[in-house]
């Protein structure tokens, strides 16, 4: 299927240098990404309660934002990890998406502002996210959530962190994770997969940009086989929580998401996987303008409900 015309229209209105890793510093990329993702054209759904907090982390306080919709006390909580290649992104860049997710799932969502690379390389982000999961599990009254194992979710690098946290929770004896929602997740560092070669210079996320992100987060190549970052290469994926994996046709990360779904299924883990034709990496961020983005968000929320 060709590129979706609604996606093309969005791309035509984005700056060409949004991820120009050749000339921009991480700090400059963060500023540009924040400017593009927090523009007034992105409407924000109201949520019954939105609260800023700081929670204990392995290297100091971790900022989080709690979104508690009506009736959230009837559902287990959801812990959300934002994307951005472990280098860019924050609570504000994903605020609109998390609001939609909270309302659609009727769950309290705790969005986590984990430490970023290169200032804090692997495993800093993963350990922050695991600490956030433990805090949410033990503070349901503050979060406004009900009983049941928390779910985890994330997009792109946040999907990597959600998958890694699920492994960490299994390996460390808890807390239990009820579900993992992985939205076009980073799961491997094999840049020769067909989806990488087909979309090497593709739409917004390119092969070179993804290689740069890996260099920032895991500069020591010998550590890239660690299952808490290279989740697809984990020796054992049995006993993990059920998963829903979202991928996109024109995304360099497409094949690793599909491969992880196959590994989970082979290990007896309940998993659903949908590859959205005509879509690119990050398409759920454009759900206000792209019909398939709305559809994917609705379907992802339905899997949690």
Image (cartoon, rainbow, N blue to C red):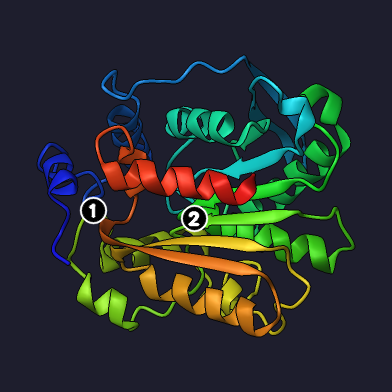
Task: Check whether the beta carbons of the residues at disc 2 and disc 1 lie within 8 A of each other.
Answer: no
Q: Quadrant of residue 192?
A: bottom left
Q: Counting residues from the N terminus, which is met first, the one under dot 2 or under dot 1?
A: 2
Query: Which mark identifies residue 114?
Result: none
As helix, strand or loop, the secondary structure at mark 2 comes to helix
- Which residue is label 2 attached to? 157
Q: Residue at x 22, y 71 (%)?
A: 200
Residue at image coords 45%, 55%: 156
| Above or below 28: residue 63 | above
Residue 281 drawn at (x, y percent) = 32, 56
Identified at 56% across, 80% down, the residue is 222
| Residue 26 seen | no
> Which residue is located at x 59 percent, y 81 percent?
263
Query: How many neighbours does mark 2 have within 10 angstroms: few (below 14), some (14-19), or many (20 or more)?
Result: many
| Alpha carbon distance from label 2 to label 1 | 15 Å
The quarter holding residue 234 reads bottom right
Depth check, front residue: 268 or 215: 268
Whether 46 is drawn above or below 261: the answer is: above
Quadrant containing the C terminus is top right
Rendered location of residue 59, percent (x, y)? 74, 42
**Left or right of 257 on screen, residue 77:** right
Mark 1 falls on what kind of element? loop
Rendered image: mark on residue 204: 1
């Amino acid at each position: 299927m060709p590129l979706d015309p609604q996606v093309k229209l969005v791309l035509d209105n984005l700056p060409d240098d949004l991820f120009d890793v050749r000339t921009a510093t991480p700090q400059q990329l963060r500023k540009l990404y924040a400017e593009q993702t927090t523009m007034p054209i992105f409407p924000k759904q109201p949520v019954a309660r939105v609260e800023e907090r700081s929670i204990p982390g392995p290297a100091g306080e971790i900022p989080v934002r709690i979104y508690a919709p009506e009736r959230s006390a009837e559902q287990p909580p959801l812990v959300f990890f934002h994307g951005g290649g472990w280098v860019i992104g924050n609570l504000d860049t994903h605020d609109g998406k998390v609001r939609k997710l909270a309302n659609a799932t009727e769950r309290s969502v705790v969005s986590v502002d984990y430490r970023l690379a290169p200032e804090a390389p692997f495993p800093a982000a993963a350990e922050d996210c695991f600490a956030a999961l433990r805090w949410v599990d033990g503070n349901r009254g503050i979060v406004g959530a009900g009983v049941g194992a928390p779910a985890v979710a994330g997009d792109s690098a946040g999907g990597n962190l959600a998958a890694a946290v699920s492994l960490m929770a299994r390996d460390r004896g808890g807390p239990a994770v009820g579900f993992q929602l992985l939205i076009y997740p980073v799961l491997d560092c094999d840049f020769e997969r067909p989806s990488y070669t087909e979309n090497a210079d593709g739409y917004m996320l390119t092969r070179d940009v993804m290689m740069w992100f890996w260099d920032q987060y895991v500069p020591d190549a010998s550590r890239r086989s660690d299952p808490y970052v290279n989740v697809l290469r984990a020796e054992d994926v049995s006993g993990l929580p059920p998963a829903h994996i979202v991928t996109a046709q024109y995304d360099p990360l497409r094949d690793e998401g599909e491969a992880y779904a196959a590994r989970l299924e082979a290990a007896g883990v309940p998993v659903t996987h949908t590859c959205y034709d005509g879509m690119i990496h990050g398409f759920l961020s454009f759900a206000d303008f792209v019909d398939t983005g709305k559809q994917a968000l609705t379907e992802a929320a339905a899997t949690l409900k």
